């Protein structure tokens, strides 16, 4: 009997994912039906976007797992009807590499002071060389797959990299910290701070008036993680006072970012439209198919969400 895979996401995503998913499922050698509509009682796996109309999982009595299309799971992890294994997307080929490239690019941009050369209406000639990378401490808050990969890439460029996580970790090239003291240590030394924490009640407003004041004066902030990690008003005040030199933000509390939000017009803010790590359909489809293969073979699923931790 074929396994039934429901694609529960926006119709435009179906157009992007149908062919890559079929290719990936063909490659693992399972007999399957893949569709955007299936009788709930017949569904074995759901390929899922949390914004999907599927919010009540109770009718899916045969369901084996829900496989998220994105890395973020905060909009679904608390759903009381979602009782089966729930896997987040970790797509090393696309999502992780995309994040490494975006974070590394903006880290180098701020380190080298490239903005002053790219936009130079006064044609000023100021040969002010930046410090070498070894003299520019970089901090990363969040040492999951994405944070670890970004930190190691930046460390390979010669930057001293420190990272903070909920639990103690050992990662080549990164000095790892945990706990409140560890967080404060990273904040006090990071001239460039990168946010890659998940969005949970414990991480909301990680950067607030108090923690922003701990950073070295003129520090740069790069946030491709979650919008809720930053208190917007506190960040704007820190930018206006000069405590923070610039903030490059890819994620926001409300998306798309409202046209009247002060981030748009602030001279020390760069807004990018949640593009730091867009999931690539071909590689994401292979990650989804691998978890389906595991489920059918009785092997452990990859990247299961910790319901208690919220990610």
Image (cartoon, helix red, strand yellow):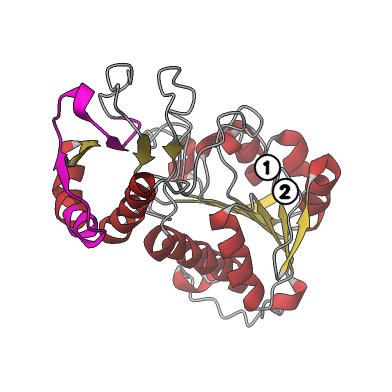
Q: Residues within 10 Å of mark 1 (few under 14, many from 20)?
A: many
Is residue 170 located in the magenta-colored stretch of the structure? no
- Residue 220 locus on image (x, y percent): 64, 56
Vertical order, 115 against 28 (above or below): below
Q: Is residue 216 visible?
A: no
Cα distance in 3D space between marks 2 and 1? 5 Å
Instruction: Name above or below for residue 207 compared with residue 92.
Output: above
Taking 90 as reference, is 310 left or right?
right
Q: Which residue is mark 2?
A: 243
Residue receiving disc 1:
238
Q: Position of residue 9 (x, y in %)?
A: 24, 36
Q: Is residue 23 magenta?
A: yes
Element assignment for label 2: loop
Judging depth in this view, the residue of 163 and 81 nearest the camera is 81
User: In the image, which residues are magenta?
Assistant: 22-51
Q: In the picture provided, is 262 more to the left or to the right than 284?
A: right
Residue at left offset 70%, top offset 44%? 241
């Amino acid at each position: 009997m074929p396994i039934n895979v429901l694609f529960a996401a926006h119709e435009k995503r179906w157009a992007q994912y149908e062919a890559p998913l079929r290719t990936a499922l063909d490659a693992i050698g399972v007999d399957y039906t893949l569709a955007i509509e299936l009788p709930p009682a017949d569904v074995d796996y759901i390929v899922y976007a949390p914004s999907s109309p599927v919010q009540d999982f109770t009718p899916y009595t045969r369901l084996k797992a829900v496989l998220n299309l994105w890395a973020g799971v905060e909009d679904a992890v608390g759903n009381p009807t979602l009782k089966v294994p729930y896997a987040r997307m970790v797509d090393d080929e696309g999502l992780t590499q995309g994040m490494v490239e975006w974070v590394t690019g903006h880290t180098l941009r701020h380190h080298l002071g490239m903005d002053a050369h790219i936009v130079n209406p006064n044609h000023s000639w100021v040969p002010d060389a930046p410090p070498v990378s070894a003299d520019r401490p970089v901090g990363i808050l969040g040492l999951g797959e994405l944070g670890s990969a970004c930190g190691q890439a930046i460390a390979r460029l010669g930057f001293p990299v420190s990272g903070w996580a909920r639990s103690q970790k050992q990662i080549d090239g990164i000095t790892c910290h945990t706990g409140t003291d560890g967080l404060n240590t990273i904040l006090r030394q990071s001239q460039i701070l990168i946010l890659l924490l998940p969005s949970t009640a414990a991480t909301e407003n990680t950067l607030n008036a108090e923690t922003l004041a701990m950073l070295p004066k003129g520090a740069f902030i790069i946030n491709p993680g979650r919008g809720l990690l930053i208190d917007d008003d506190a960040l704007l005040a820190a930018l206006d006072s000069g405590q923070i030199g610039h903030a490059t933000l890819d994620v926001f509390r409300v998306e798309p970012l409202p046209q009247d939000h002060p981030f748009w017009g602030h001279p020390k803010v760069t807004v990018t439209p949640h593009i730091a790590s867009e999931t690539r359909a071909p590689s994401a489809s292979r990650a989804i198919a691998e978890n389906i293969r595991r489920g059918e073979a009785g092997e452990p699923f990859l990247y299961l969400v910790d319901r208690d931790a919220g990610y």
